[in-house]
Image: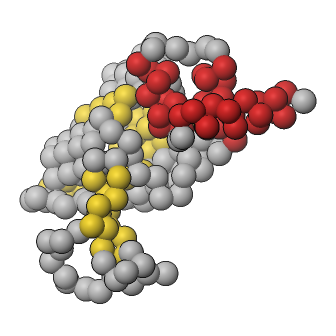
Amino acid sequence: MKNMIKSMLSFFVFLKFKNIWNIKDYLVKNNLDKGIVATVYDYYIHKEGGYVGITSKFANHPYMPHGFMGVFISDMSEIGKNAVIFQQVTIGADRLLDSNNQGNPKIGDNVYIGAGAKIIGNVKIGNNCRIGANAVVYQDMPDNSVAVSSPTRIIQKENLDNRFVVAAKNNTLKVYENGAFHELKDFPKKEKITQK
């Protein structure tokens, strides 16, 4: 019965806010963590199989190609602009009393986080970084670096371009920037991208 009521409430809340990120923005702006809107937010995220803490901070809405499936982002984590976050990612706090790494991750702009990656504790991820699938990051990453495998190896790169590009139906490319897809006009065509 409770889930049926939450589903009905969700319908009306989504009519007003249009998407889950607008709901989260409203909750953060109004410093709310209780009430109908917070309940709908929590219900939707859990129904999708993930958790994104209400007090987590995003510079703009991230792109999540597979939705919230298995994504965990702890409260007070900070994520910069144009993040791409794949499924099963954990961006989690370290709350152990005897830990040298207590705190929450701070992630820079244009960071690409592969499936199953884990970013744990008080680490700073620089701008334009890539975190490979299933990498475990527990130390800082400088700008334009790549983290792969476990234990993590940091590979310094120059000027990484982590824009997420998809092929559109009209044979053009679209890039994800500033919370939305835009037509890409200046893409260096190294290889053909085809729509699946």
Task: Name which quarter of the figure residue 127 lies in.
Answer: top left
Q: Where residue 80 sits in the image (x, y, percent)?
A: 28, 38
Q: Nearer the viewer, residue 85 or 63?
A: 63
Q: Is residue 56 visible?
A: yes
Question: Where is residue 144 drawn, in percent x and y?
Answer: 16, 53
Identity of the residue drawn at 70% across and 37% down? 11
- Which of these two is toward me, 189 or 102? 189
| Residue 75 shows in the view | no
Establish if 92 lies above or below 179: above
Residue at 41 percent across and 19 percent down: it is 29
Quarter of the image holding residue 45? top right
Q: How many marks?
A: 0
**Residue found at the very far right of the displayed protein:** 1
Give percent across and percent down for residue 182: 29, 61
| Residue nearest the observer in this picture, 5 or 112 | 5
Q: Kindly identify the residue that appears in the image at 60 percent across and 22 percent down.
A: 38
User: Which residue is located at x 61 percent, y 23 percent?
Assistant: 37
Please tell me which residue lies in front, 168 or 187.
168
In the rendered view, does 124 fall on the left or right side of 102?
A: left
With respect to residue 188, does 128 lie above or below?
above
Answer above or below: position of 29 versus 158.
above
Horizontally, residue 160 falls left or right of residue 6, namely left
- Percent position of residue 3, x then y: 82, 33
What is the basis of the colouring in this image? secondary structure
Whether residue 191 sits left or right of residue 85 in the image: it is: left
Report the side of 148 relative to 144 (left or right).
Answer: right
Q: Which quadrant of the figure contains the N terminus?
A: top right
